[in-house]
Image (cartoon, rainbow, N blue to C red):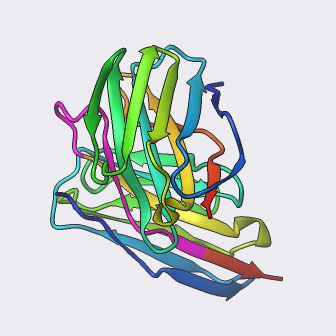
Amino acid sequence: TQLLEQSPQFLSIQEGENLTVYCNSSSVFSSLQWYRQEPGEGPVLLVTVVTGGEVKKLKRLTFQFGDARKDSSLHITAAQTGDTGLYLCAGAAGGTSYGKLTFGQGTILTVHP
Amino acid sequence: DVKVTQSSRYLVKRTGEKVFLECVQDMDHENMFWYRQDPGLGLRLIYFSYDVKMKEKGDIPEGYSVSREKKERFSLILESASTNQTSMYLCASRTGGTDTQYFGPGTRLTVL
């Protein structure tokens, strides 16, 4: 069974601060995805990283996939109150797994004005 | 845009009742998934279906069953609801060739 350890579980910061969320595993993933979930809604995909060492930017969000494709990070620059939510990383095993994803435990981010 | 809908946003049932959670997707996706989400545990896969009438157990299938009679619809069944099945249930779908899953809004089930 593949496991994804996500940290920290909770983050409470002031607007304008920077933050980083980590996802780590001993398993190799064919791709890693980051989702964001707002209260009362399902997760929505932010980004997919596929290549080891890949870095993707989405405005103030920077996503990195580790060289060995076992870990990933999400960095938010100058956080805003609108960034508040639950962030989930999810790894895909690839092959004949029918697209099954292994999810991290999630990071609840609260950005205070 | 892909749309995944779930039949109820909130549901309250009593212990021992049979519970049906319905999920419908409108994008002709082959694969569909049922997860439960609990604080601190992330999303855990209950069952998934890779084609009509085809299903496989996920990580926590005990106490659940599923049905997929049509490609667009995937149902989760709690044969005899128990209080430890109180949770948020999320349905997702995916098309082959991509790892992206599209989620419904979730059903928050409370079993009393």
Measured as percent of width and height from the top left, residue B104 is found at: 61, 39
Q: Is residue B26 shown above or below A102? A: above
Q: Main secondary structure of the magenta part?
A: loop
A53 relative to B11 in the view: left or right: left
Which residue is at 61% across, 25% downward? B2
Measured as percent of width and height from the top left, residue A35 is found at: 52, 53
Please check the rendered image and state whether residue A58 is part of the magenta-colored stretch, yes or no.
Answer: no
Number of numbered callouts drawn: 0
Measured as percent of width and height from the top left, residue A76 is found at: 58, 70
Residue at the far right: name it: A113
Q: Quadrant of the N terminus of chain A?
A: bottom left
- In this rendered view, identify the residue nearer to me: B71 or B101: B71
Which residue is at 62% across, 54% downward? B109
Which residue is at 38% across, 44% downward? B64
Magenta segment: A93-108
- In this rendered view, identify the residue nearer to me: A88 or B73: B73
